[in-house]
Image (spheres, rainbow, N blue to C red):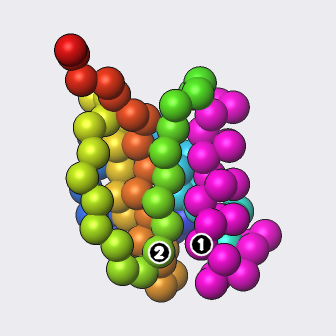
Amino acid sequence: MLEGKALVEDTDMPAKMQIQAMASASQALDLYDVVDCKSIAGHIKKEFDLRYGNGWQCVVGSNFGCFFTHTTGTFIYFTLETLNFLIFKGSSSPP
């Protein structure tokens, strides 16, 4: 497990959820090759959907841009090993 080596860049998640995010990322890195970002992201998303309800999104990679709306208290962006991890629960905009 590598969660002690993660660097949190930005977050509004509660501390326990942050720890879970980093633990899920570490577990995924143990299960999948570091270049298999799609499987790593899928693993983390499924873990969060099971623990915290459906609607989670996960982006993993070393170079990506994004623009999104998230539910307050569900966002984290951190680095672990050579990868960046973005995890959040989507939010719909009012009509």
**Label 1 neighbourhood size at 10 Å, few (<14), some (14-19), many (20+)?**
many
The quarter of the rendered structure image containing the N terminus is bottom right
- Residue 58 image position (x, y, % from top left): 50, 52
Q: In the displayed orientation, state which residue is furthest to the top.
A: 95
Does residue 49 show up magenta in the picture?
Answer: yes
In the image: residue 12, left or right of residue 90: left
Residue at image position (38%, 64%) is: 78
Does residue 41 show up magenta in the picture?
Answer: yes
Residue 40 position by quadrant:
bottom right
- Residue 9 appears in the picture as rendered: yes
Relative depth, front residue between 22 and 59:
59
Task: Specify the amino acid type for callout 1.
Answer: Cys
Asked if marks 1 and 2 touch (Cβ < 8 Å), the reply is yes
Task: Specify the amino acid type for callout 2.
Answer: Gly
Residue at image position (69%, 54%) is: 43
- Residue 31 image position (x, y, % from top left): 78, 70
Q: Give the main secondary structure of the magenta stretch.
A: helix
Q: Which residue is mark 2?
A: 61
The label shown at residue 85 is none
Q: Tag 2 or tag 1, which sits nearer the N-term?
A: 1
Relative depth, front residue between 4 and 46:
46
Relative depth, front residue between 52 and 91:
91
Residue at image position (53%, 57%) is: 22
Q: Which residue is mark 1?
A: 37
In magenta, the rendered stretch is: 30-51
SS label for mark 1: helix
